[in-house]
């Protein structure tokens, strides 16, 4: 496990597209520049060596048992195998769930700033995005405004909410208490929660991720649909494989009719199955090492920023491999900030405004890369921001 290796990524790597030509360092889209676990690459080699890539047995019980065992082992979370479904991606699943759980025009609550496809998929499906903005504190940390959440969910035209747990981009790993309150509020208002827990495995030392549904009262569980995946954790997003856990019999039936029967989306392809099996069954050590590397990278970035850009506010990171950085002390115009980052500093982060208006003059920085790349990007950014605007 050499997380400092600089791997030449292929021509189809979205993150690196055009970067070499522009001499730009890409620390944006959320995949890692780390090699996968040896177990995954070995499984993929073995599958390729079979030389036949025919139909698979798909989401059979053997596969489902491996998936479930992983979540039991790491989170003490047990679910019936029949509640486990497949979707190519979590964004795809969210888009589908929005259709299954609400009617056109109805509201769906998101907690901004938040992963931008939440809004996009709500609006693409002609629903209304209702915001329950997170509360930002002086140290850059965030908490939920639970009174406002209750207010928003109590509106009869609001169907439910999408929770991001851990939260991208602000890096919160929600506490047991926060999760209990969110599920209690949704239950009290008879609203559902799509809980996107794709970042559940990427957690800083000293923090623990709790699955929302494990924190909820028994009666509230049916209203929670949980989305998880091996893709973010194990760096196999290009293989497109995620899992949706649905307890409610009516929603399960709707998923079967619409997704499996009508759309014919039912199982990962043969390479995704092989990789996901190796990820879930045989990559725990890699995951632990990856988390240590992310913690180290964060510590390096934090020390550098404290020294070189003391007025930048870096939110405390509890989970995800994303840093959320407020640069408004150095640049007050988000458009100009982006221009200065891309054109002058030649670094590509995610501009904060894409996650909501609250993110103006923030950058989201993906630190899942060799520290040599991370530090070079931070040096370029700091040199640019220290210039007079
Ligand atoms: C919160 C969150 N959900 C979903 C995704 C993407 O999921 P998928 O690639 O499975 O659609 C990401 C990727 O960054 C994410 O941060």
Image (cartoon, rainbow, N blue to C red):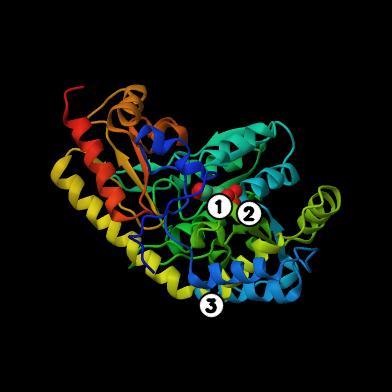
Element type where label 2 sits in the image? loop
| Residue 218 in view | no
As displayed, is residue 26 above or below residue 218?
A: above
Q: Is residue 345 left or right of residue 174?
A: left
Mark 2 touches mark 3? (CB < 8 Å) = no
The residue where tag 1 is placed is 185
Name the residue located 56 percent from the left edge and 54 percent from the top edge. Answer: 237
Q: Quadrant of the N terminus?
A: bottom left
Q: Does label 1 or label 3 sit earlier along the sequence?
A: 3
Q: Does label 2 or label 1 sit earlier along the sequence?
A: 1
Residue 61 picture location, percent across and down: 75, 75
Mark 1 Cα within 10 Å, few/some/many (few <14, many 20+)? many
Q: Is residue 171 left or right of residue 284?
A: left
Residue 169, quarter of the rendered image:
top left
| The one of 187 and 199 positioned closer to us in this rendering | 199
As displayed, is residue 34 above or below residue 360?
A: below
Residue 288 picture location, percent across and down: 40, 71
As displayed, is residue 38 above or below residue 272?
A: below
Specify whether tag 2 is near ligand 1 (CB below 8 Å): yes
Element type where label 1 sits in the image? helix
Residue 240 tag number: 2
The residue where tag 3 is placed is 73
Q: Does label 2 or label 3 sit earlier along the sequence?
A: 3
């Amino acid at each position: 496990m050499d997380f400092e290796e600089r791997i030449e990524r292929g021509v189809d790597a979205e993150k690196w597209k055009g970067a070499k030509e522009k001499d730009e360092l890409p620390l944006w889209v959320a995949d890692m520049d780390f090699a996968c676990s040896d177990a995954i690459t070995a499984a993929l080699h073995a599958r390729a060596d079979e030389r036949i890539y025919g139909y698979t047995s798909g989401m059979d019980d053997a596969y489902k048992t491996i998936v479930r065992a992983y979540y039991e082992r790491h989170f003490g979370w047990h679910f019936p195998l029949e509640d486990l479904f497949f979707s190519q991606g979590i964004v795809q699943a969210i888009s589908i769930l929005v259709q299954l759980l609400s009617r056109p025009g109805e509201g769906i609550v998101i907690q901004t700033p938040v992963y931008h496809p939440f809004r996009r998929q709500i609006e693409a499906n002609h629903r209304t995005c209702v915001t329950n903005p997170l509360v930002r504190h002086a140290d850059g940390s965030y908490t939920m405004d639970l009174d406002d959440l209750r207010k928003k969910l109590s509106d009869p035209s609001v169907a439910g909410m999408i929770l991001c747990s851990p939260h991208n981009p602000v890096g919160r790993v929600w506490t047991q208490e926060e999760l209990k309150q969110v599920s209690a509020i949704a239950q009290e208002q008879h609203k559902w929660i799509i809980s996107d827990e794709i970042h559940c495995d990427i957690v800083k030392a000293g923090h623990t991720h709790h699955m929302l549904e494990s924190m909820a009262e028994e009666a509230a569980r049916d209203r929670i649909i949980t989305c998880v995946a091996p893709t973010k954790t194990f760096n196999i997003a290009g293989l497109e494989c995620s899992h949706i856990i649905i307890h409610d019999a009516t929603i399960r039936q709707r998923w079967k009719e619409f997704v499996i029967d009508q759309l014919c989306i039912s199982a990962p392809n043969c390479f995704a199955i092989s990789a996901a099996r190796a990820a879930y069954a045989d990559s725990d050590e890699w995951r632990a090492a990856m988390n240590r590397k992310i913690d180290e990278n964060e510590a390096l970035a934090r020390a550098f920023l404290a020294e070189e850009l003391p007025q930048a506010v870096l939110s405390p990171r509890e989970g995800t491999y994303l840093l959320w950085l407020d640069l408004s002390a150095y640049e007050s115009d988000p458009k100009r900030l982006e221009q200065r980052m891309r054109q002058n500093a030649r670094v590509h982060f995610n501009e904060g405004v894409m996650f909501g208006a609250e993110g103006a003059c923030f950058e989201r920085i993906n630190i899942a890369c060799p520290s040599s790349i991370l530090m070079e990007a931070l040096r370029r950014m700091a040199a640019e921001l220290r210039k007079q605007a």
